[in-house]
Image: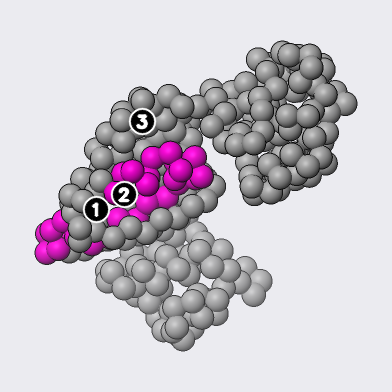
Amino acid sequence: MALRDLSYFETIATTATYEEAADRLGLTKQALTKAVRRLEQDLGGLLFLREGRGKAITPLGEVLLERARRLRLTVSDIEREVRGHAQGLAGVVRIGGGTTSVENLLPAAFRELSERAPGVRFELSIGMADALKDKLRRDELDIVISPCHGEDVTEFDAEVVLRDEVILATSPRHPLLKRGTVRIEDLAEARWALQSQSISLRAWLDAAFTAHGFPAPTPLIESDSMIMLHRMVEEMQLLTFCGRHMMRALVELPCPQVTMPRNFALMTRRDAYLPPAVRLLKPVILETADLSGGPTL
């Protein structure tokens, strides 16, 4: 069973048709068909069945796909380990995080590591937590710093580096501020600027309202850009839901019923090979968290 055939198979299995897989790989459909036939001969069973103009993966194919993914990650780890020994404290550290971790931890950590290992370069990906974790699973990132949930601790090596609270925030001119602490029923007529429903913070807020017997907020403005949301909140005296440290020009509207604690963790793939520069960066980030007054924001 050839590694190249397994690589081709993984691409075929994750695309709709052989033609799409061929375009992605820069090969012919015939070449991919032959690769699949070789694998089927080695395994003694079918990997795909015809389904209209496309194909459907078989149970045997599903098993092979999972093993092929694991093997690809193992081969990638071997390549990076050998390259890491050759480069020493050099090479590229691929790290992903959201605005929170980037602003609060990484500048000081990058500066510290650059002083210790001048040959290290950084590739920084800023994005949503779910997308970054998917990249970590695919070995496209070495480290992710993002909000951490119970399943993350099971799947990844995770160490908490920041503790935060997500709160209601608004313009300093919002009339509800005159009430001091508010209850969830006081927010029935409020106008909102919120992230999309696919974002975990929004899902938590909606669930909090529902749990207290109120309909989830219907936002006047919905965006995944926190910068845009904050500008709209300031200009239009709206409410939003954001980390305490991200308020900037906004102010907190105290409401204990919709205050959510959350932890940010430094995550790496469990049992994965970490190049020397990555192994050095992990404690530097942890030290940075300690130097900034501990992991509580």
Instruction: Indicate the amino acid at tag 3.
Output: Ser
Instruction: Indicate the amino acid at tag 1.
Output: Ser
The residues colored magenta run 84-111
Q: Does residue 70 lie above or below 197 as drawn?
A: below
Mark 2 lies on a secondary structure that is helix
Disc number placed over residue 87 in the picture, else none: none
Q: CA distance from mark 1 to mark 3?
A: 19 Å
Q: CA distance from mark 2 to mark 3?
A: 15 Å
Asked if residue 67 shows in the view, the reply is no
* Residue at point 75%, 44% (across, down): 232
Q: Position of residue 190 (x, y in %)?
A: 83, 28
Occupied quadrant, residue 268: top left
The earlier-in-sequence mark between 1 and 3 is 1
**How dense is the environment of label 2, judged by Cα within 10 Å: few (below 14), some, or many (20 and up)?**
some
Q: Which residue is mark 1?
A: 114
* Residue at point 83%, 33% (across, down): 191
The earlier-in-sequence mark between 2 and 3 is 2
**Mark 1 and 3 residues: CB-CB less than 8 Å, in contact?**
no
Q: CA distance from mark 2 to mark 1?
A: 6 Å
Quick check: 25 left or right of 168?
A: left
**How dense is the environment of label 3, judged by Cα within 10 Å: few (below 14), some, or many (20 and up)?**
few
Q: Position of residue 216 (x, y in %)?
A: 78, 29
* The stretch drawn in magenta includes residue 142: no
Along the line of sight, the residue nearer the viewer: 1 or 160: 160
**Residue at the extreme right of the image, as rendered:** 189
Q: Which residue is mark 2?
A: 110
Instruction: Indicate the amino acid at tag 2.
Output: Phe
Quick check: 169 left or right of 101?
A: right
